[in-house]
Amino acid sequence: MHKRMMYIVVLILIFMMIGCASAPVSKGFMGAVDLNMSHVNAVSLKEGKAENTTFLIFGGQTYPTVYEAARNANITKVATVQYYQKLGVLGLTTKWTTVVTGE
């Protein structure tokens, strides 16, 4: 029984370390991060969004491209770009979002 409990504790610690490794930028344990990298080029009339969700470290650690977010709203001139990252329960999942505004 003692050996089994030790395996469970080690497994939990491994999952916790993997969860932290998959989310290099965070604001608190389950917070959202707003990396506002805005550069105004056009009037903000439309808003497009693209999302990517990863489980642990599988699926990449990248934000969706500005092109994908702009294409979702038929934006031809980009005004602002915002990046968001939101951790799921225990850091097992991470939701990466790119939001683009423009005309």
Image (tube, rainbow, N blue to C red):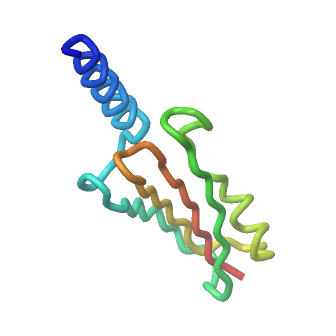
User: Looking at the rendering, in which quadrant would you find the C terminus?
Assistant: bottom right
User: Looking at the rendering, in which quadrant would you find the N terminus?
Assistant: top left
Q: Hey, which residue is sitting farthest top in the picture?
A: 3
Q: Residue at x 73, y 59 (%)?
A: 68
Q: How many discs appear?
A: 0
Image x and y of residue 81, in percent? 55, 66
Image x and y of residue 69, in percent? 69, 65
Q: Quadrant of residue 99?
A: bottom right
In the picture shown, does residue 53 fall above or below 19? Answer: below
Q: Hey, which residue is sitting farthest bottom in the picture?
A: 45
In the picture shown, does residue 3 fall above or below 45? Answer: above
Q: Quadrant of residue 34?
A: bottom left
Name the residue nearer the viewer: 6 or 57: 6
Q: Residue at x 48, y 36 (%)?
A: 56
Name the residue nearer the viewer: 37 or 8: 8
Name the residue nearer the viewer: 15 or 62: 15
Q: Quadrant of residue 22?
A: top left
Image x and y of residue 96, in percent? 53, 54
Q: Hey, which residue is sitting farthest left in the picture?
A: 2
Q: Residue at x 64, y 53 (%)?
A: 64
Image x and y of residue 16, in percent? 31, 33
Name the residue nearer the viewer: 77 or 49: 49
In this picture, residue 11 sits left or right of residue 84: left
Q: Residue at x 45, y 56 (%)?
A: 85
